[in-house]
Amino acid sequence: MSNNWRKRFAAKAGLDKPVFYSIAGRFWSLVAGPVTVILIGTHFSPELQGYHYAFASLLSLQAFAELGLGTVIIQFASHEWARLALVGGRITGDADALSRLRSVARFGARWYLVAASFLTVLLAVGGTVFFSRKDAHGIEWLAPWLALCLLTGANLFMLLLWSLLEGCNQVARVYLFRLVVVVSNSVSVWLAILGGLQLWTAAVWNAVSLVCTLILFIGGYRHLFASLFFGKVASAKISWRADMLPLQWRIAVSWLGAYCMNSLFTPVLFQYHGPVVAGQMGMTWSLVAAVAAIATAWPNTKIAPFGVLVAQKKRKELDREFIKTLKISVSVAILGALSGWLLVLGLGLAGTNFAARLLPPLPTGLFLAATVLLVAQVTFQIYLRAHKKDPTMWVSALGAAVVVLSNFTLGKWFSVTAMAAGYLAANAVLLPVTAAIWLKYRRDCSLQQLSNL
């Protein structure tokens, strides 16, 4: 009886294997995150903490190198995988679909090789200039920063393998692998901090991530990748310029918009208010990001399955899965945001020294409230992109422009609370606009389907 109850609960909550592994990874991060934060707070000086989180913020510049190609690869691969299968570790099925999938993989390999090289140089030069303009407070940052840049470039190339596997509907294995990687990363970070490696901690994290990814992929999917990268590409191909670019440039704009909306808080505060305030922002943002990561576990695991349903024209099943996913993800976001805010409030009321390493409850609450709205937006966007379209691109661009302006004006002349209020206001406007676009697109698709009957 209890087993049947668990099955019914899992079905109602959408807890299939991919979601379970994703939630396990997010839950591990939620548990491990405070451990990491405590270790940073007790083993790093306030200035060193600021440099650590400034490093992390600048590394998110990889969005400019990838330009959304990973998401595009997942979408196109999932549509081809509707006519393919993996049997005994080898790809079988429609020859033309396999040829098109190989063409996507080959182009991706060329793109990511160039992008990884470009990112490494950009981060090394740009970061060195950025940090050289500040008083280093006796902190040796140059060597660990350059090592981190090199490892970040290598890990960027690994994103191609993750995207191809997820697009080939190996979602459960992908998220199981990610769980293994995230646990390994956390342990390596703790050992690095306790070992006194200071700013080398981030480089250690990236090195462990790279090694784990290579071991897992080469060991489990070497035949699949050999077929994709070295198998014959016939006349059936997918053209990047004609087929992928129309979607990629829209996703790229959306991704760059997301970077500007979510990754500039710490560098701006570092620039105008110093490393201590930047460290508070970085540590608080870790909490906000953890809430978002857990809540988006449901929609993120549906990227490839949604694409397969679109290719198979199973619209009713697609809409049913989407509504279910939206309800669950938003509910989890609300619960997580409330729990996170109560935690920060409790630390402050208890008068703990650790509360001084975080932002006060008011700006923290504003950031968490904005995250709930952001989770809903992400779910709508995943549904739309499953159709190889992204009509919300201009919304993301507009929102990014508003938040960037807000960050540099409010962040410089007012306080972090004003920055958080601007961020919440932007998301409060973007969500209903995104929902309206989704509703119109869904209605148009239904009308088109009726006209084809």
Image (cartoon, grey):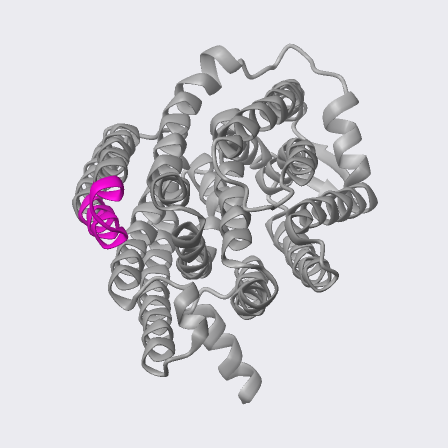
Location of residue 391 in the rendering, given as x and y in whole percent from the top left corner: 28, 30
Viewer can see residue 79: no
Location of residue 340 in the rendering, given as x and y in whole percent from the top left corner: 37, 69
Q: Quick one: 328 or 86, which is closer to the camera? A: 328
- Residue in the picture at 38% in, 51% down: 317
Q: Main secondary structure of the magenta part?
A: helix
Residue at the limit of the structure toward the bottom, as seen here: 1
As drawn, 36 above or below 246:
below
Q: Quick one: 152 or 195, which is closer to the camera? A: 195
Q: Quadrant where the N terminus lies?
A: bottom right
In the figure, residue 385 lies in which quadrant?
A: top left
- Residue in the picture at 33% in, 66% down: 337
As drawn, 98 above or below 360:
above
Q: Quadrant where the C terminus lies?
A: top left
Q: Is residue 273 left or right of residue 101?
A: left
In the figure, residue 83 lies in which quadrant?
A: top right
The verdict on residue 44 being magenta is no
Viewer can see residue 146: yes
Q: Is residue 95 left or right of residue 222?
A: left
Location of residue 425 in the rendering, given as x and y in whole percent from the top left corner: 17, 48
- Residue in the picture at 21% in, 33% down: 444
For the record, the magenta segment spans: 410-427
Q: Quick one: 146 or 421, which is closer to the camera? A: 146
- Residue in the picture at 58% in, 64% down: 36
